[in-house]
């Protein structure tokens, strides 16, 4: 009888050990799955942050372009002229003179992955002595309103 009792004790210990090992294996697989999904989510968040940053840089390029000194002579009609931001060469502001009193301003930025974001703003050229440009209040666009070949720089 003693040997029977000892055999059952070992058997109960083995079952407990199997349960603990099963629990450890399941826990490790759940942690591995969680780590995989966490890394995937982290990449998505980083891409979203880079896209948002490029979007904001393109808006800043528009505002910067309004303050720049552009060549507003008739020789520049229907030709893009661009200025690159000195602190970040991936930020650019360009102007297309459509007529001597109307133009299209473009702000562009490039994300770290190479995706380009473009914003457009209709502008008017004032006929004062400085020939400054002013924006149309509802002239902001996130697409080029011209024919595709005219939008390519």
Image (cartoon, helix red, strand yellow):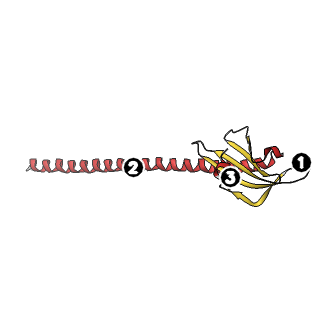
From the image, tell me which residue sits under label 2. Answer: 33
Q: Residue furthest right?
A: 129
Q: CA distance from mark 3 to mark 1?
A: 25 Å
* Chain-order first, disc 1 or disc 2: 2
Q: CA distance from mark 1 to mark 2?
A: 63 Å
From the image, tell me which residue sits under label 3. Answer: 119
Label drawn at residue 112: none
Find out whether the residues at labels 3 and 1 contact each other: C-beta distance under 8 Å.
no
Q: Residue at x 39, y 49 (%)?
A: 33
At mark 1, the secondary structure is loop
Query: At which x and y percent is residue 80?
Result: 73, 45
* Chain-order first, disc 3 or disc 2: 2
| Residue 102, quarter of picture | bottom right
Residue 19 visible in the picture: yes
Quadrant showing the C terminus: top right
From the image, tell me which residue sits under label 1. Answer: 130
């Amino acid at each position: 009888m003693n040997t029977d009792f000892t055999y059952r004790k070992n058997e109960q210990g083995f079952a407990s050990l199997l349960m603990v090992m099963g629990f450890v294996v399941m826990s490790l697989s759940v942690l591995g799955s969680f780590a995989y999904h966490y890394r995937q989510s982290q990449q998505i968040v980083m891409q979203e942050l880079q896209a948002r940053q490029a979007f904001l840089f393109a808006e800043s390029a528009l505002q910067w372009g309004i303050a720049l000194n552009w060549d507003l002579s008739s020789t520049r009609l229907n030709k893009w002229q661009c200025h690159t931001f000195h602190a970040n060469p991936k930020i650019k502001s360009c102007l297309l003179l459509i007529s001597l009193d109307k133009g299209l301003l473009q702000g562009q930025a490039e994300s770290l992955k190479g995706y380009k974001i473009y914003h457009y703003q209709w502008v008017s050229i004032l006929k004062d002595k400085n020939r400054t440009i002013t924006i149309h209040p509802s002239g902001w666009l996130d697409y080029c309103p011209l024919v595709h070949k005219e939008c390519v720089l």
